[in-house]
Structures are given as structure tokens and as C-alpha cells.
Image (tube, coloured by chain):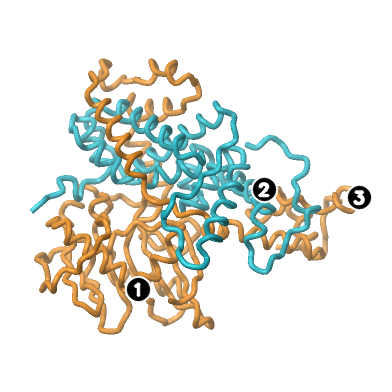
Amino acid sequence: MTTDPYDGVSDAALLSRHGSGDADAFGELVRRHRDHLWAVALRTLGDPEEAADAVQDALVSAFRATRGTGDAGYRGQAAVTTWLHRIVVNACLDRMRRSRARPTVPMPEHGAGLPRGPDEISARETSIMVAEALATLPAEQRAAIVLVDLQGFSVNAAAAVLDVAPGTVKSRCSRGRARLLPLLGGLRNGGNQPSEARVSPRGEEDPR
Amino acid sequence: MTDLTSPGDEPLPAGPDRSAHPTAEQLAESADGLLPAPEEQTVTTHLLSCPDCAQTAADLATVPDLLARYAAPAGPMPASVAARLDAALAAAAAEAPAEAPAATVVPLAGRAGSHGSRRWRLHGAVLQIAAALVVVAAVGALLVGALHLGGSGTSASTAAKGSGADLRASENGPRYTATGHVYTVTGLVADAQRLQDGSLQRAVEGGARAEAAPSAAARGATAPTVPATSDVAGSGTGPASAPIPTQLPRVPSVTAYGLAATPIPRAQIDACVAALSGSAQPPLAVDQGVFAGEPVLVIVLPVTNQPDKVGIWVVGRDCRPDAEQLRRYVVAPRP
């Protein structure tokens, strides 16, 4: 009978154990959260290789930073999740700023859960459309929209991840969605295309 | 909120007709309550008389839904990436530990050069965590407060091995479970359908059996109905019908995430459903799971006056029907 030694152990306790020298604790923490962290990195950066590098850099740094810190007495599940997301998002933002290149458009992985059947081709196309639209956003707006609209974070939770005020998250999401609207218009049923004259932003300040 | 007797203290900018309309950004910020009052007043007044802008404003509200619906599903971390990551962590583990004493560890200070970026913001997080351990607890408590989570009682979680309250579904009644399933934005509608037909609960059940983990919730599966979940205090697997074979990977139970595994009492769930549905209609399905890294209740309710639709709620365990706790509400076709 296999026993999962970490079943019932909170993330905070895992981090404490890691700090105290448990060789497997951090790996367990990663296993629990890597899918979410991967999704955030991939949707933010667009390119799977970049995303893999960002997640790896972030988590290896986190590993080193918290090793030997002893029993930190972490409190609260939310803090560890937030922290993990924060370091991954920061790694992504850092890459985007350094490269100054527009994020590439990801090709959906083959067989990665796209619906089958007669709509399969169009589903692939629409997901590419979304990815391309996201790639046009400035880094901060893209990160905010990925967290809130695609990963389901509340505004406050996203603010904790991004280490900004909730109002800033809301503002980045608003502006990002305004930018996305003309690019996603074709996805809406009924084909109500927004009039070009209204939608093109004017007098833009730097994205915050 | 619109004061029709004083339409717009701020005059609209003069000029060609085009510049009199708010930008899409302004419309979006107006909808999110981010504009200063005079600007907000201007926009609101304009919308009353401009159907095109009103349409744009309505379209803006659909963007999050479009993203959720049409973005590619995230999918798990690819195996190759995970393997690389594990190898990198193993390599880091083999290194000599940092020499600085725990209380003053600032290991990234020396690595800033190698990363080539001074703006590597991990510094801040590391300093918070490593440099002052007392601060850690305060930061954690602050974040917990900000995220509206009560004390997770993590040390108590090990006592609550069998997740799931005594939420025995009646014969044809709604399904109440605590699968600990990880819900995602893009997969929510499909998962809710699987909740309604029971396949998600069965899959979790089968996965838990396949792992043979003794702390998996002891749920006896009877074929046509919902698996009954055991009491926290109770233990022992229920009468086991033949385990349902499944190829699905094991879904982590609520306890595996270390979340407060104390199951939500049925009375509290009922109160939550009543608050959300505002009617006496019983829910179609209720599950305790994980969403965006936090424990949530997923509640599937019929939609009043739309018999072909269901409403899917994802709320925090406190089920406060205010904006912070309400994470998501989606209307989907009834399966």
C-alpha cells in the first residue's frame, strides 16, 4: 500500500520542511502547482521554450532562496500559492522587458484538449486568434489579463501576485480588454463588429 | 447613478464628431468604476444617447468571456518540461547550501549579475521570506487577510484525512461531493457538465482508488448514484463495489493540497446555495474543489426561466455573495 507522505501537508508546511532540510518537500510543492504555473507562463510569454525557461529559473531560484531558512512558520495556504505565482510572473515580465520582443504566438499543443469533431479546425483557429490578440498587449496588461481572465484569480489575488494595488490590476485589465476588443470581434455571435472609429484608442499614455 | 437633471458638468471636447465619443478605454474604465466622477458622468450621459457607444460598452463586457471560451485549454505542464525542471531542482539540491545564516540569507544578491537584470523582483520576495522570519508570518497573515481566507488550520488538516462531509445524496437528489478537483477557467463548463452527470465524481473516485492512498476520502461508490462521502470522524471504506477503472491521473484530494480539509457543513452549503439561487430550487451539483489555487465551492444551479441553461458558480468556501468571494459565474447549456 503506497502512502503519500505529503498527503494532508499544507504548502506552508512543505516550504518549512524544505527550509529544514527535507529533500523532497520542494519537489512536492512544485508537483502540486506546476500546471498552474506553467499555464500562467505559457499564456504570458506565448512561447513554450521561453515559458519553460521562466518557470525553471523562477523555481530554482525559489528553491535556493528558501533552503536553509529553517522552520519558517508560514501561515496560510494563500501566501505560498501567491508567492509561487509572483515569482513566475516576475520571471516572465523580466524576460519580456529584457527581450523587448513581442511575445510569440503559441501553437496549441496537438491533442491538448481541443474539442474534437466538426468544429475542431475552427476551435484551433479561434484559440490562435486569442493568443495573437494577447500577444499585442503590453506586458503588464497581458499579465493582469492572464491572471484575472484566464487563470481565474480575483482582482485582489492578482494584485497580491503582481504586488500592485487592486485598482492598478483593474485598470490594466480594463485597458487590456479595450485593446483586445477589436481583435476579438470576430468571435462574437451575431458578428456585431465594433465601429472602427469608436474603438481605436486615441491619446494613449504609456501603459502602466 | 445617472443624474438626468445635470447632464455632464464637463463639456465634451469640441471638434469633429468622432472625438466626442469616449474611447474604448474610457468605456472600459467607466464600466469598472475607475473614472473620476466628472469623466464618469460624461461617459454615462453620452451612453444614454449613443447606441454605437452603448454597443461598444456591451461588447467590452463580453471580452473576459470570449477569452475564457476561446483560449486554448492550458493543459498540464508537458512531461519534457517537468523532467527538465526536476533535473534542475535536483542539481540545485546537490549544490552546497548558502553559507549565510538563515536570518540574513540574501542568496540572490550574488546572482543578480548572472541574471543580468537588476529588476529581478524575486529579491523583494526573497528578502521578505528569508531575511526576517518573523516578517514572514505577518506577510502571510496580511495576504491571507487580503485574500479573504480564514485561518487554514493546516495543522488540523492531517486529522481530517477523509475529505468530504457527510453529504449523502438522496436517491435522485443533487450531488454533493468534495472531490478536491482542480477547476480551471477554460475547463469549467465541461467539468460542470461532468459534475451533473456524475462522471467527474466517479473519475475522482477511480483515481483515488488506483492510487491506493489510505488517506483518500473513503467513498463507497455505488454504480448509478453519487458516491456517498464519509464523515470526517468516520473511516473505513464503504462497501466497495468493483472499483471503476479509469485512465485518468489521480486528482489530488482536498487534503493533498493541504487546504483546510474540514468539510463544509451541509447546512452552510445549503445557506450558500440559497443565497446564490434566491429560490427554493435545489442545486444540480455541489462540489468542493480548488480553483486558482484556493479552495472553492462549485455550485451548479438551474437558471430561472431558462430551462435549457444552468448557472455555474465558483465561490470561496465562505460563500459570501460579494464580489471578492464570487470568482466566477457562467451560464452554460444544460447537458
Q: What element carries label 3?
A: loop
Q: Residue B121: x percent and y percent?
A: 46, 28
Check the picture and name the quadrant holding the N terminus of chain B: bottom right
Q: Mark 2 lies on which chain?
A: A
Q: Name the residue under label 1.
A: B270
Instruction: Give the quarter of the image for residue B198.
Output: bottom left
Mark 3 Cα within 10 Å, few/some/many (few <14, many 20+)?
Answer: few
Which one is in front in this view, the residue at disc 3 or the one at disc 2? 2
What amino acid does circle 2 point to? Arg
In the displayed structure, B40 sits above or below A72; it is below
Which one is in front in this view, the residue at disc 1 or the one at disc 3? 3
Task: Give the residue at x 42% y 66%.
Answer: B190
Chain drawn cyan, letter?
Answer: A
Which one is in front in this view, the residue at disc 2 or the one at disc 1? 2
Instruction: Give the quarter of the image for residue A171.
Output: top right
Q: Can residue B254 be seen in this view?
A: no
Q: Residue B16 carries which label?
A: 3
Q: Name the residue under label 2.
A: A179
- Nearer to me, B249 or B128: B249
